[in-house]
Amino acid sequence: MEGGAFAASGSPQHCREQNAIPNAARLAAHCRTLGVPVIHVHFLVSPGAAGLTLNAPLFEATLDENALVRGTWGGAPVEGLEPMPGDHVVEKMRMSAWEGSSLETILKAEGRDVLIETGAWTNMSVEHTARTGADKGYVMVIPEDGCSTMNADWHRASIEYAMTNVALVTNTDAVIAALG
C-alpha cells in the first residue's frame, strides 16, 4: 500500500498494474461460494519484532522499518482482502507460509492437497511458499495476476524462471473457470 513501510520499493504501483487486490478478492469470493476454504497468511511481528530472527536483510528491514506490527495499520489486511467469517487466518514470521505456521494443519483438517496461491511479494513469499508446497507434495496453482512484488521485472523472473518448475502458473479468470 502507499504509505507502507516498503512502498518505496515500487510494490504499490506493481500491485495496481497487476490488479492483484481485485483479482485475489474476486477469486476468494468465488471460492467461498463453492465451499473452498480461504486461508489468509499474514506476516506479523510483535512491537520491536520480538522473536524475529535477523538473519536476512528482509527480516532486518522489518525491524528497521517498524513494519508488519500486529495491531497497527501496517499489520492490518489490505482493504478488500480482509478475512471473512469462516476463513482461516495463519500468522507467520518467515518468507514461506509453511515455516512455523499452522498452514499444513489447516490443509490436512480441510482435506486439501491443491493450493491456489495469491499474494504480495511474488519473488519472496509466494515463490517460497510454492516451492515448499511442491516439495511437500501439494499441487500449487499460481494465478499470477493475483500476485505482485516490487516491479514487473522481479515478478516476471519469479513467474517465468522459478514458478513454472514448481507450480501451475495461470490467471484468475482461468482458475475461476476451472472451479466452475
Image (tube, helix red, strand yellow):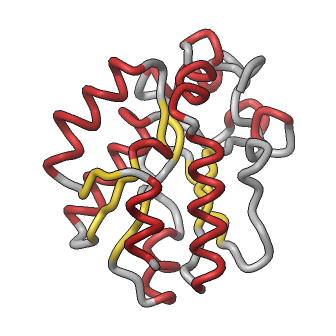
Residue that appears at 39% across and 44% down: 144
* Farthest top residue in view: 8
Q: Residue 3 location in percent, x, y?
A: 77, 17
Q: Residue 168 location in percent, x, y?
A: 24, 57
Q: Quadrant of residue 28?
A: bottom right
Q: Residue 61 location in percent, x, y?
A: 57, 19
Q: Quadrant of residue 132?
A: bottom left
In this orientation, which residue lies closer to the viewer: 68 or 156?
156
In this orientation, which residue lies closer to the viewer: 171 or 101?
171
In this orientation, which residue lies closer to the viewer: 97 or 175?
175
* 53 sits to left or right of 153: right
Relative to 4, residue 119 above or below = below
* 63 sits to left or right of 166: right
* 155 sits to left or right of 162: right
Question: What is the total number of numbered labels drawn onto the structure image?
Answer: 0
Residue that appears at 64% across and 77% down: 32
Residue that appears at 58% across and 67% down: 39
In this orientation, which residue lies closer to the viewer: 32 or 55?
32
Residue that appears at 56% across and 40% down: 20
Relative to 102, residue 105 above or below = below
Q: Quadrant of the N terminus?
A: top right
Q: Residue 17 location in percent, x, y?
A: 54, 26
Relative to 144, residue 89 above or below = below
* 146 sits to left or right of 30: left
